[in-house]
Amino acid sequence: MSRRRPLSPQLNVEGSLPETEETRSHLKRSLNLTDLIFYGVGCSVGAGIYSLVGIGADLAGPSIALSFLLCGVACCFTSLAYAEFAARVPLAGSAYTFTYVSFGELCGWLVGWNLTLGYAISAAVVARSWAEYLMRFVDGLMPDEDASKLRWLTHFPIHFPGLDSSYVCCPLAIVIITLCTLVLVTGAKESTRFNSAMTMLNLSVLGFVL
């Protein structure tokens, strides 16, 4: 449980791993600096900003601007920590590998599963918010009686035997997650292009609102 992943072979004088058959990365380097910048910006200013602004405004009121400022400062420190780790531990795996090397296998295993659960939950929340916004947009274009017929796309009741209350799922969110998954499996370069386009659109919308 406390075994740490070794950084072998030793780093050379320049601070990088020597290029050998054993140390060469198995991941294809298909992303350039621009792709990585847009990826980082897209993760920092993701679609969650549209689903959390209303909740934040309800809790913080006019001070939501200060809340976003403090969160931005925290993101800067997080980015600097990741940059330092990436320079000292030049291996694939992100936070899982950093924790594995620093604290051992058990901590790395916990961090890896926490990352997986965190990404799954955030993807579900964003997909549900995306579906709700899409249906509200469609409702504005259609008469009330026609829009009510499509309500099942975001509020589909599920009844369990033995329970009086019913749960509600969002089939449209499932479709959105499936489409995003299809974009991701096409390849790293292709999905990064899609992410860059969405990031530019996202920043344009936020800039227009500001």
Image: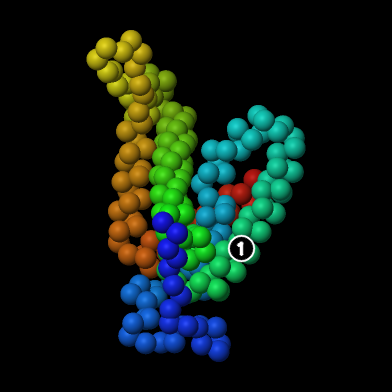
- 10 Å crowding of disc 1: few (<14), some (14-19), many (20+): few
Name which residue type carries label 1.
Ala
Residue drawn where x is 56% and y is 59% of the image:
41
Whole-percent x, y for residue 166 in the image: 34, 17
Relative vertical location of residue 199 with respect to residue 142 in this rendering, above or below: below
Q: Position of residue 49 (x, y in %)?
A: 57, 44
**Left or right of 30 on screen, residue 71:** right
Residue 121 placement, left or right of 164: right
In the current view of this chain or complex, which residue is farthest to the front? 2
Q: Residue furthest left?
A: 161
Locate residue 207, reporting x and y percent. Answer: 64, 52
Residue at coordinates 74% horizontally, 43% vertically from top-left? 66
User: Looking at the image, can residue 198 be seen?
Assistant: yes
Front residue (pair 127, 3): 3
Q: Is residue 162 left or right of residue 140?
A: left
Which of the 4 quarters of the picture holds residue 3? Answer: bottom left
Q: Residue furthest bottom?
A: 13
Q: How many marks?
A: 1
Q: Quadrant of residue 93?
A: bottom left
The residue singled out by tag 1 in the image is 81
Taking 200 as reference, is 15 above or below it?
below
Q: Is residue 127 visible?
A: no
Name the residue: 70% across, 39% down.
64
Q: Residue at x 51, y 87 (%)?
A: 12
Secondary structure found at label 1: helix
Above or below 208: residue 128: above
How does the figure colour the protein chain or chains?
A: rainbow
Estimate the x, y position of residue 38 in percent, counting from the top left: 52, 63
Point out the image quarter for the N terminus. bottom left
Q: Looking at the image, which is closer to me, 4 or 160?
A: 4
Q: Quadrant of residue 147?
A: top left
